[in-house]
Amino acid sequence: MSVGEAERALPVAVSATAAGVPGQRAGEVDAATELEMARRWADEADRYAQQTEVLAQQPALLPTWSPMARAFAVYLAFAAVSVLIMLVMVLASGVGVVGGWTLFSWMCAGLPAASLIGGWLVLGRWGRPAVGAMTAPRYPVIGFLLCFLAVPLAYCGYLILIRTLR
């Protein structure tokens, strides 16, 4: 054998016991003990399956809340964001960046509609359980009332606050 042939030699096979794999257990296996262990493992697997089914029937967004409370919170959050945008627009109109008609149209229609649509989409996507109900309860009347009343009422509150402080 030459020097080049030694480098191309195949690796030597090692037996399973030499590689550290445990051998067969010494002694007899108690069938009753093995059946009891298998029963316990099956019961534990059933418990985990039931927990998984319960979790899959809850929505990802605020899973412990009732559907109406979840919808109320989502619509209220979107209305609050719209109120903040409206306040920025009011300040911008005071400087002359935004006109009065633009402010009025966004305050009475644009921002409330955007917040209603945003809440509707969020409830449809994350307010629905992974398994079970195909559509999530979205409560559009609550959304309409919150979104279309919050922004104009906040503007009225802003006007009252400014006029009383002057």
Image (cartoon, grey):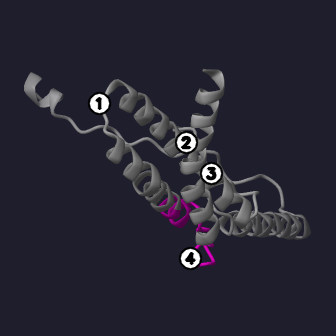
Label 3: element kind: helix
Query: What range is drawn magenta here?
Result: 120-137
Quarter of image, res 62:
bottom right
The alpha-carbon separation of the residues under discs 3 and 4 comes to: 21 Å
> Mark 4, residues whose alpha carbon is within 10 Å: few (<14), some, or many (≥20)?
few
Please tell me which of labels 3 and 4 falls first in the chain.
3
Q: Is residue 138 magenta?
A: no
> Which is more toward the observer, 32 or 129?
129
Give the numbered dot on residue 97. 1
Tag 3 and tag 2, C-beta contact below 8 Å: no
Q: Nearer the viewer, mark 3 or mark 4?
A: 3
The alpha-carbon separation of the residues under discs 3 and 2 comes to: 16 Å
Give the numbered dot on residue 76. 3
Task: Name the residue located 66 percent from the left edge and 27 percent from the top edge.
Answer: 164
Task: Name the residue located 51 percent from the left edge and 37 percent from the top edge.
Answer: 84
Label 4: element kind: loop
The three-letter amino acid code for the residue at tag 3 is Leu
The three-letter amino acid code for the residue at tag 2 is Tyr
Residue 40 visible in image: yes
Please tell me which of labels 3 and 2 falls first in the chain.
3
Please tell me which of labels 1 and 4 falls first in the chain.
1
> Which is more toward the observer, 68 or 135?
68
Position of 142 relative to 118 (above/below): below
Give the numbered dot on residue 135. 4
The three-letter amino acid code for the residue at tag 4 is Thr
Q: Nearer the viewer, mark 4 or mark 2?
A: 2
Give the numbered dot on residue 155. 2
Tag 3 and tag 4, C-beta contact below 8 Å: no
Position of 154 relative to 42 (above/below): above
Please tell me which of labels 4 and 2 falls first in the chain.
4
